[in-house]
Image: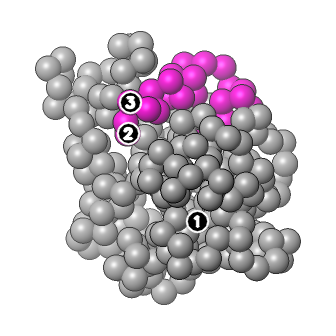
């Protein structure tokens, strides 16, 4: 895992978007198309905004999948990840080929259908984040590191659900769904390249556990340590608990060489 740290969230988001845009351009030029997995949530907002503004990406050549969705939440709800992707990516750049997780339908059929499409060919690039409890997608601790199923129906723990309230997606804990569809940990690792974008001080403890701690289902995103082509993008706040040797120089910061 390569760790890149920036002075603030804005600089981190732009740098990650520049990297992502370059990878998409290169993949489309080489293969004629790109298969992409996209994370949602508050941590990805600035990154995605910078990405859609990047020039030269042939978005009509991108096939899109996403990581997770709440069970039973209508697409009209502000917290719906399907709505999030339409509003911030699909409808903005004109992606034509996408496979969204419909948490209002039969979950068994949805996981089977989207899973079959997902595994039909290799995934070129995945954008992910790390939750306050260390979750990867909606794989809360202790995460299932063994299943080979591409998507799972999972039960969300209280820490994960409280995070959604704290970020303003829901008015109360009772309003947060208790179940979700999530891409499995092993399936995420099948992506050729992974960019993990994690801003904010509230993620600092999880970042430390997942980067400097052992690979463990209790820190689900720690599994990214085993992926040969993962780049972790941090800002000063999310990296504040890391050892200097792990964090490296903060780009744009006073200790930048």
> Residue at 58% across / 65% down in the picture?
66
**Mark on residue 66?**
1
Note whether 218 is above or below 82 in the view shown: above
Note whether 107 is above or below 199 in the view shown: below
Q: Is residue 109 visible?
A: yes
C-alpha gap between disc 3 and disc 1: 25 Å
**Mark on residue 199?**
2
Image quarter in which the C terminus is found: top left
Note whether 131 is above or below 34 in the view shown: above
Element carrying mark 2 = loop
> Residue at 54% across / 29% down in the picture?
206
- N-terminal label among 1 and 2: 1
Mark 3 = which residue?
201
Magenta extent:
199-221
Q: Residues within 10 Å of mark 1 (few under 14, many from 20)?
A: many
C-alpha gap between disc 2 and disc 3: 7 Å
Residue 136 percent coordinates (x, y): 62, 44
The colour scheme of the drawn protein is one colour
């Amino acid at each position: 895992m390569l760790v890149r740290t920036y002075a603030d969230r804005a600089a981190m988001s732009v740098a990650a978007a520049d990297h992502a845009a370059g990878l998409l351009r290169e993949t489309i030029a080489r293969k004629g198309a790109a298969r992409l997995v996209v994370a949602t949530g508050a941590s990805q907002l600035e990154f995605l905004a910078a990405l859609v503004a990047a020039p030269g990406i042939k978005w009509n050549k991108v096939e899109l999948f996403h990581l997770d969705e709440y069970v039973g939440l209508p697409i009209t709800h502000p917290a719906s990840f399907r709505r999030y992707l339409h509003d911030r990516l699909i409808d903005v750049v004109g992606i034509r080929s996408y496979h969204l997780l419909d948490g209002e339908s039969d979950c068994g059929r949805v996981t089977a259908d989207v899973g079959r499409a997902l595994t039909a060919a290799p995934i070129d690039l995945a954008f992910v984040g790390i939750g306050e409890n260390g979750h990867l997608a909606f794989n809360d601790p202790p995460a299932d590191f063994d299943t080979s199923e591409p998507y799972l129906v999972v039960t969300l723990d209280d820490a994960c659900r409280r995070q959604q309230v704290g970020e303003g997606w829901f008015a109360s804990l009772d309003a947060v769904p208790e179940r979700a569809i999530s891409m499995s940990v092993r399936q995420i690792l099948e992506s050729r390249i992974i960019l993990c974008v994690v801003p904010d001080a509230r993620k600092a403890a999880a970042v430390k556990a997942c980067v400097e701690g052992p690979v463990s289902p209790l820190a689900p995103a720690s599994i990214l340590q085993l992926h040969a082509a993962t780049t972790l993008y941090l800002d000063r706040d999310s990296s504040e608990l890391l050892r200097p040797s792990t964090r490296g120089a903060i780009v744009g910061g006073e200790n930048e060489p």
